[in-house]
Image (cartoon, rainbow, N blue to C red):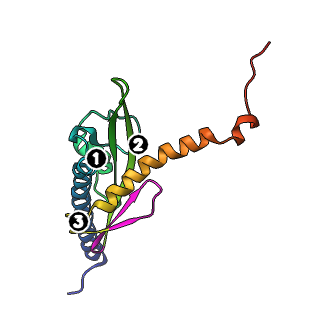
Amino acid sequence: MTKTRFKKLQDAIKIYGAAAFENLMRCKGLGEAIVSGFSTYMGCDKDCVKAVPPEGAFDPRKDYGDDAFSYSQREVIVLEPIRFALALTIDNSEDSGALWLRTAIGVEVTGDNFDIFIAEQPVIRVSLDYKGKLEPVFEAIYEEFMRIFKVEVLEFNDKRFATGIGFLPKT
């Protein structure tokens, strides 16, 4: 008996749902591995590194659990990259303050690999069997954090801005 178009569509939806769920679970596992391994890579306490939402306000001290991941904001699971952010809290060496940094990370399964997107850096491809293979990801996150400060300092020291624009007090 030939399948109806409706039955064929049901079958396609079933395959899509299984792929979406597999993508979610694999990407969540990789995200958790990135967050848990980054503190070792950086040589800091585990409490300095958290998974946080990739957008909007957040508290870098809070444990967000699943709420750090983009799928938690959806009512249905769809086949799309999973997004989260990694927040790093750095104690100030001169006082009791601290600075936090956040970078958004996107992850998706493509064939036998993960494609990992960190800010504006080139895509990083890592095998689905990622254990012991995350150093390029950690390095890209570190480089992204360093880039933030390098750009700010370069702009601060750029002499072109010293006389190009400014404000004068009214007299």
For residue 117: magenta? yes
Residue 114 % position (x, y)? 31, 66
Would you name the residue on which mark 1 appears?
Answer: 72
Could you tell me the amino acid type at mark 1?
A: Ser
Q: Nearer the viewer, residue 35 or 153?
A: 153
Could you tell me the amino acid type at mark 2?
A: Glu
Q: Please tell me in which quadrant of the rendered image residue 20 appears.
A: bottom left
- Residue 49: mark in rendering: none
Residue placed at 19% from the left, 64% from the top? 131
Residue 16 % position (x, y)? 28, 68
Q: Please tell me in which quadrant of the rendered image residue 7 appears.
A: bottom left
Closest to the camera, between mark 2 and mark 3, is 3
Would you name the residue on which mark 2 appears?
Answer: 55
Would you name the residue on which mark 3 appears?
Answer: 130
Q: Is residue 102 left or right of residue 48?
A: right
The residue stretch that appears in magenta: 111-125
Label 1 SS: helix
- The first of marks 2 and 3 along the sequence is 2
For residue 122: magenta? yes
Q: Nearer the viewer, residue 148 or 65?
A: 148
Using a 10 Å C-alpha cutoff, classify the residue at mark 1 as few (fewer than 14 neighbours), some (14 to 19) or many (20 or more).
some
Question: Vertical placement of 162 versus 31: above or below?
Answer: above
Q: Is residue 91 left or right of residue 168?
A: left
